[in-house]
Amino acid sequence: MTNFTKLQTAIKNYDTYRESLIKKSRDVLKLSKQLIYAVHRDEMKNATTLLKTIEAEKKKLDTITKKNVRLTNEGSYKVAVQEYVEAVLYYNFVKTGKLIDVMVLPEHYMLGLADLPGELTRRAVFLAGKGHVDKVVHIRDQVDMIYGELLKFDFRENEIRRKVDAVKYELRKLEDLVLSLKMQK
């Protein structure tokens, strides 16, 4: 005979963990946006503090997912982690000029990486206004590399395919910006 009490407990526990996951995901999502915004404003001291905070909150989020492996497939978790990846990649790119690995599921990393060129394009426009042509060219080259690498994958999921198409449009904007800057010289 089926143990309905056991089934009810399992479902209730999952729902409790899911609610905690949703709340913590919002925290990580909010911090990701704050980190990106601080970097855009060149407030790197504040950004470094935010980075430490977001790392701690991400660990708490991951602790929740360890309660039930199905939680890693929840939409709120997926969105929070991809925003986290984007924010951490952007922060590190601005500090070092390079991309880094972020220890998350590969599909979550790819989603965050595919969002990064949008922030890099904003950064390039900011730098162009300050006359930093070499830095704009470096950003264009990195986005070109990202796009080239993403094209090597056979993505079956529509979300990532759409994001790869968006990378192509960001690259085109950067190419136009670099051409415009070089024509002005």
Image (cartoon, grey):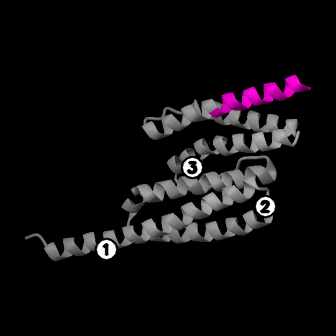
Check if residue 103 falls in the magenta segment.
no
In the image shown, does 29 or 5 lie closer to the viewer?
29
Q: Secondary structure at mark 2?
A: loop
The structure residue drawn at horizontal position 42% and vertical position 72%, both measured from the top left corner, is: 20
Check if residue 181 falls in the magenta segment.
yes
Q: Secondary structure at mark 1?
A: helix
Q: Which residue is mark 2?
A: 43
Callout 1, which amino acid?
Asn
- Does residue 57 sit above or below 71 in this rendering? below
The mark lying in front, picked from 3 and 2, is: 2
Residue 166 picture quarter = top right
Q: How far across and how far down the image is residue 60, in percent?
A: 53, 72
Neighbour tally class for label 3: few under 14, some 14-19, many 20 plus, Cα within 10 Å: many
- Does residue 108 sit above or below 45 in this rendering? above
Q: Secondary structure at mark 3?
A: helix
Quadrant containing the N terminus in the rendered view: bottom left
Q: Are marks 3 and 1 in contact (CB under 8 Å)?
A: no
Q: How far across and how far down the image is residue 185, in percent?
A: 92, 26
Q: Which residue is mark 3?
A: 109
Neighbour tally class for label 2: few under 14, some 14-19, many 20 plus, Cα within 10 Å: few
Callout 3, which amino acid?
Tyr
Q: How far across and how far down the image is residue 39, in percent?
A: 74, 56
Q: Which residues are magenta?
A: 170-185
Callout 2, which amino acid?
Glu
In the image shown, does 46 or 114 lie closer to the viewer?
46
